[in-house]
Amino acid sequence: MRKVYLDNAATTPVDKRVLAAARPYFSQRFGNASEPHLWGQEARRAIETAREKVADFLGAKPKEIIFTSCATESINLAHKGLLEAKLREFQNPKSQIPKKLHIITSSVEHKAVLETCKHLEKLGWAKVTYLPVDKYGMVRVSDVKQAIRPETILVSVMYVNNEVGTIEPVAEIGKVIKGINRSRRASHSPPLYFHTDATQAIQYLDCEVDKLGVDLLSLTGHKFCAPKGIGALYVRSGVPIVRQQDGGEQERGLRAGTENVPGIVALGEAIGQVQRSTFQVQNRVKELRDRLIDGVLKISGTKLTGHPTKRAPHIASFVIEGVEGEAMLLLLSDKGVAASSGSACTSGVLGPSHVLTAMGISAEVSHGSLRFSLGKDTAGEDIDYVLKVLPGIVVQLRKMAPAA
C-alpha cells in the first residue's frame, strides 16, 4: 500500500541535513552555553550562528531573535510580555499609557492567540476586539483601521490561516499601523505594536519583517522540517517585553532556561534550507496543490474553503457534503493517506471549527471539512493516488449516512 503524507501543516518530517547538523550537539558538543569553558563556548557559538541565520531570513538583527520552545510559547511571550511591560508603565505618574489597554485580533487566529487574548481579558489586563472575516477567511484592512482606538496597544493578525490556507493582508495592515504611529508620535502618544503568527508562512512566503511592517513575529521549527520543541520570536528593537518564564538570564533575559542547543542548531539549518530554496519549492508545491484542488472539486457536493487565489501554496481545504470529516480521515488512513479535518472529533473540541464558523459555514457543513497540506517532498504520484482513492471513500460514506 502506498503511503502518502499530506498533513504537513500539522508537522513535517525532519530534513536529513537538519538532523545531521543537530546530531553532534546531542553528544560530542553537549556543552551548556551559559558556561565559560570550551564546551560552553562551542555551544554558544552554535546558538549565535543559528540566531544569525534566523535573523537573516527575517531581515532582522540577531539581537532581535529570541529562541523559544514553539510558536505557542512565542505568542504567549509576545502578548503577555508586551501587556505586562505596558502595565508596569502605569506606575509612572507621568505615563501616557491609557489605563485600559486594547488588543485587536481576528476571529480565525490559531488557538494560541485566541486563548492568550482570552486569558488577558480574564486578568483584566486588556479589552479584546475579535474582528470578523469574509467568506474566504480574510480580515478586512478597513475593519482593522476602524477598530483602532487611542488605548489600542497591540494588533495581532496571522500571516496564513492554518486551517484554510488564506493569506491575510499583513503588509497592508502594517502600512496602516505605520501611518497611525506617525500620528501618535506627533501627539506623544504610546505606539501601536503589530504581531503576526507566521507559523504556516515561513516555508513558502516572504517573511521579511520590514516588508510586513511587524514588530513581533512568531514561528516554530516543526512546520518547516526542523524538530518539534524549538521555535523563535522576533522582537523589534525598542519593543518592550517582560519575560514570562523566570530564572536565569538566557536569551537577553527574556526567556530563562538552559538553551536547547541541538534544537536551535536544527532551526538555523532548516531556515537556511528554506531561504535557499523558497521559490523553487513554492512553485512546485503550488502546481501540485492546484492539481489536487482541481481533482477534488470534481467530486459532487465539494466546495473549496479559503481564498481561491490568495492562499498558501501548500494548503488545500474543502468541505464535502454528506460525510463526516473524521470518517474520511479514518478511511483515508486505511488507504495510507494522512490528512486532517476541522471537525469536532478530530480537533477534540465539542463544536464545529471556529475558522469555518467565522467564514459563515454552517455547523452541519463544517463537519465535512477536509484539509490536505503538502510538503517539499510531496510527489505527483502522491496526488494521483489521493485522487484515485478519495472519490470512492466519499461514495462509501454517503451510502452509509442515515436518510434525511
Image (cartoon, rainbow, N blue to C red):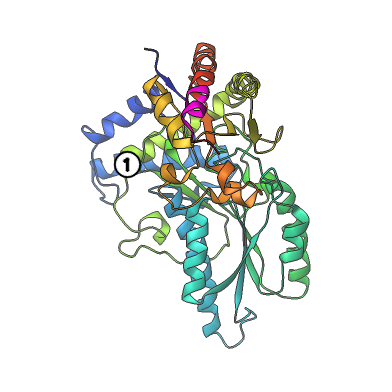
| Relative vertical location of residue 372 with respect to residue 104 in this rendering, above or below | above
* Residue drawn at (50%, 66%) of the image: 118
Q: Which residue bears the numbered disc 1?
A: 261
Kindly identify the residue that appears in the image at 40 percent across and 13 percent down. Answer: 2
Q: Is residue 129 above or below residue 309?
A: below
All told, the count of numbered labels is: 1
Residue 197 in sight in this render = no
Residue 397 point in image, percent of width and height? 48, 28
Toward the front, the furthest residue is 403
Residue placed most toward the observer, 14 or 360? 360
Q: Is residue 335 left or right of residue 370?
A: left
Amino acid found under the numbered disc labelled 1 = Val
Closest to the observer, 398 or 142? 398
- Most foreground residue, 121 or 299: 299
The residue segment tinted magenta is 394-401
Task: Indicate whether residue 400 is drawn in magenta.
Answer: yes
Q: Nearer the viewer, residue 204 or 330?
A: 330
Q: Position of residue 232 (x, y in %)?
A: 46, 47
Question: Which element is circle 1 on?
Answer: helix
Q: Is residue 24 left or right of residue 373?
A: left
**x and y percent of residue 147 in the render?**
72, 65
Magenta residues, dominant SS class: helix
Quarter occupied by the N terminus: top left
Residue 174 in the image, given as x and y percentages of width and height: 70, 53
Residue 210 covered by magenta stretch: no
- The answer to whether any part of residue 351 appears in the image is yes
- Which residue is at 52% across, 35% downward? 403
Does residue 59 lie above or below 113 as drawn? above
Left or right of residue 256: residue 122: right
Residue 313 lies in what quarter of the image? top right
